[in-house]
Amino acid sequence: MPQPTQSPYGWLMLGGILVTVWLWSRLARRDDRLLTVYVAALLGAFLGAKIVYLAAEGWRHFGTPDMWRQWATGKSILGALLGGYLAVEIAKRAVGFRGVTGDWFAAITPVGIIIGRFGCLLHGCCLGVACSPAWYSLTDGQGVTRWPAVPVEILFNGTALLVFFVLRRSHSLLGQHFHLYLMAYGVFRFAHEFVRETPHILGPFSGYQLAALAVFALGAGGFRHRQRVPIPPLTNQPPCRPITTP
């Protein structure tokens, strides 16, 4: 169950956003339109994160004394991926940008998630299910031994960063990196939800597992579309601009 936001959590979440802003601002120097794409991604991610959280578990707080606090602080990474992806596609069409941005998002997104998950670790939220004590288990604030859900997700995203670094250096699967991330994260989260303490809404399945399936489907659809309609990946070359003469 989400807990009230505390200072370390809020600052780390803000830090994650600032890191992604810094990384993307360096990329945006190559084409002014990329700044619009990033702003759209950020807004879409916030909106998607809130919608999926409310659908998956925020509804449980309806009518409770702390309803507004829970609704204000609750968010979902799965929703952020869905909302951010869709917002980027809409923004790219609006500004006429046809280059590939997914490979950069694949390198930036895990960084933001890792920083945010360290906030979860300090805050004591996004807990794993109760389990027997073991070398890998964690103890929460009430002394309950739990599956290390947050460290496992940090490990997943750290591994993803390493994989995409290797793919970029080897120029492999260019233009497909974010699609690969969406598929991998969707599968990971669907399986990992079975050991996370989240409410079930459909038999043994949580709302986040339904969102995980949507994330996987979005990545798989994008991967297949890119195979059929290849688009040149974003390069280090500045955008072409018309030459004017006095």
Image (cartoon, rainbow, N blue to C red):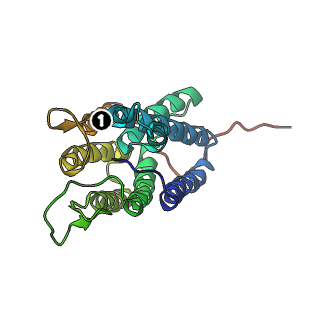
Rate crowding at label 1 as few (under 14), some (14 to 19) or many (20 or more) other CA atoms within 10 Å: many
Residue in front for this viewpoint, 147 or 240: 147
Q: Residue at x 41, y 54 (%)?
A: 113
Evaluate whether residue 85 shows in this view. Answer: no
**The residue positioned farthest toward the bottom in the image shown:** 135
The picture places residue 194, in percent across and down from the top left corner, at: 18, 47
The picture places residue 127, in percent across and down from the top left corner, at: 29, 54
Q: Is residue 124 above or below residue 82?
A: below
- Three-letter amino acid code at disc 1? Ala
Q: Residue at x 38, y 42 (%)?
A: 76
The picture places residue 47, in percent across and down from the top left corner, at: 48, 34
Q: Is residue 130 above or below residue 191?
A: below
Total labels drawn:
1
Asked whether, in this view, residue 170 is left or right of residue 67, the answer is left
**The residue positioned farthest toward the right in the image shown:** 246
Residue in front for this viewpoint, 182 or 33: 182
The picture places residue 133, in percent across and down from the top left corner, at: 15, 68
Residue identified by numbered label 1: 211
Q: Quadrant of the C terminus?
A: top right
- Based on the displayed image, in which of its 4 quarters is residue 155 positioned? bottom left
Asked whether, in this view, residue 186 is left or right of residue 6, the answer is left
Residue in front for this viewpoint, 107 or 206: 206
Evaluate whether residue 107 shows in this view. Answer: yes
**The residue positioned farthest toward the front in the image shown:** 65
Q: Is disc 1 placed on a helix, strand or loop?
A: helix
Q: Residue at x 34, y 44 (%)?
A: 176
